Image: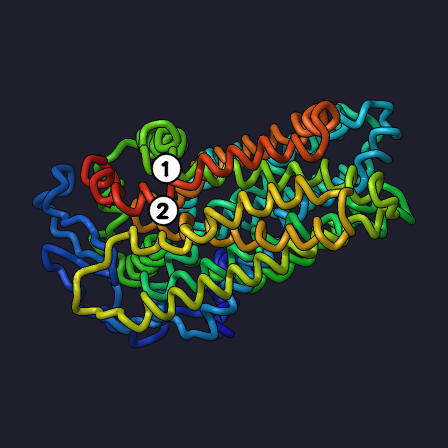
Amino acid sequence: MRDVIRDSYSGHLLRLVHKPHYLRYAEEEDGFVIPKFDQSEEVKDGDRQMVNTDSLPSVRGVDLHLVTWYGPKDSENPRNWTLGKKCYVVFLIMILTTTVYVGSAIYSPALEQASEYFDVSTTVGSLGISLFVAGYGVGPLFLSGPSEVPAIGRTSIYIITLFIFLILNILTALVTNFAGFCILRFLAGFMGSPALATAGASLDDMFPAHKLAYSMGFWGLAAEAAPAMAPIISGFVVEHHGWRWAFWEMTIMSGFSLIILFFTLPETSPDTILLRRAQRIRQKNGNWHYQSQSEITHAALPYRQILVDSLLRPIALTFTEPIIIAINLYTGLVYATLYSFFESFPLVYEQGYGWSLGVSTLPFAALFIGSFIGWVIYCYWNWKWVDITYDPAALRPAPETRIPTAFIGAFCFPTCVLWFAWTAIRCHWIAPVLSGIPFGMGSTLIFNPFLTYLPYAYPRYAASALASNDFFRSMMGAGMPIAAHPLFNNLGVAWGNTIIGILSVAMIPIPFVLYRAGPWLRKNSKIAL
């Protein structure tokens, strides 16, 4: 636990002011002897490869000492952390992800009350959902790239943006005009976005390929379940205490998350950890020739290029990589369908079955149940066909081995939508409620394979690839609450969802095509593995 606190954001700030003995690193202890680092041409960290210093013209010929890990079992290497520490960090990332994702849909039960308060139509009032989703779609393009810069790291981005997210939720609970409400919702989504794109890269920092699926599954479960559970969290309190309490609940959740992450979330980026190690060694002996790989690499690059690459890379990936384009389209449709439920569920359960506001949010629990079933299936598949067959001496398996469970999800998705479309209001209420289970299964079995596939297809740009996916699917999700109102009012719940179901059927070939054509597409890409 001492290491967790020492490596947390609070520990880092404390060490800038004062270095208490119990928060010291090995390099700061009296009598520490700098070991002889491996200066071979190729330095490996698990599956990662770092650039040979001789390949960098700006530093060639300089007597540099490359600071790496203290052997293959270095406890500072996130891949070597204890299982308990890794699980705790996964738990913290799940808390962060849940807090932000709940923020999008927690407003949906408050939509009518807030629209009445601001004297706008419910279609205009739905901007409170759309702008938040748009914010956390745009945010990673600006906030996830810098997390790949070693001097910044991932934890700093998480903590600073979460603090601003907390302030914005307080202001949203107090706002008195609709323009200010819309601006605050967009900014809240923007500031909450790193958890949604960078979190996958944090997990990749800690787990090797054959173990990553479990942690990604947990994270995916949080990401999938949070929007579904959000209306239940706020439905009853909004019904009895008013629309502002949806945002007071968000304030409480984000405040709790900020406290626990501020004091106990350690840095996971290997480049950042090694950079700080190199800085400590230089401070210890005054020899500036001790440098980390990231410092050596960035020495050959102007700061302007580093900044441009960090900010523009996710945008470039969104429009230039066929693999990412296909995955973005598919996950975007799944996301848009989820947000269409925030419009169609009230029509079905409040107006159709005559339920109260709070009770009408309970069918969203079926989506959570389905997500949990999908997570179990995904983890079992990984254990049976990936984990127990893993051979560290063998060649790394192709990234496409992560895709097969998406074959099941591809058929669950349209099953749910068409099932809901033609049973809602026509049958006993249990029929449309149960249709949410295959949607939860399908979304989990689509998201988890793809979000695990992307970091292994683009290992050097994992955060940027995930940021691209978050941007695209969020833009589709953001547009759906606005489009869903006229869609369901003009065509009805049955035919409106049928259109979505037909689109989902058209997406079924995507995982099959990527599984077969993925190696060829990666071979013809300049940046894929």
Question: On the picture, is 371 further left or further right than 240?
Answer: left
**Residue shown at 72%/23% (left/top)?**
490
**Residue shown at 56%/47% (left/top)?**
415
Can residue 97 be seen by looking at this rendering?
A: no
Spatial separation of the CA atoms under disc 2 and disc 1: 8 Å
- Residue 281's place in the image compared with 51, above or below, is below
Can residue 55 be seen by looking at this rendering?
A: yes
The one nearer the camera, 174 or 477, is 477
Percent of width and height locating residue 338: 61, 42
Question: On the picture, is 492 further left or further right than 446?
Answer: right
Q: Quadrant of residue 290?
A: bottom left
Q: Pointers 2 and 1 in contact (CB under 8 A)?
A: yes
Q: How many marks?
A: 2
The one nearer the camera, 471 or 85, is 471
Q: Which residue is mark 2?
A: 454
| Circle 2 SS class | helix
Q: Callout 2 environment at 10 Å: few (<14), some (14 to 19), or many (20+)?
A: many
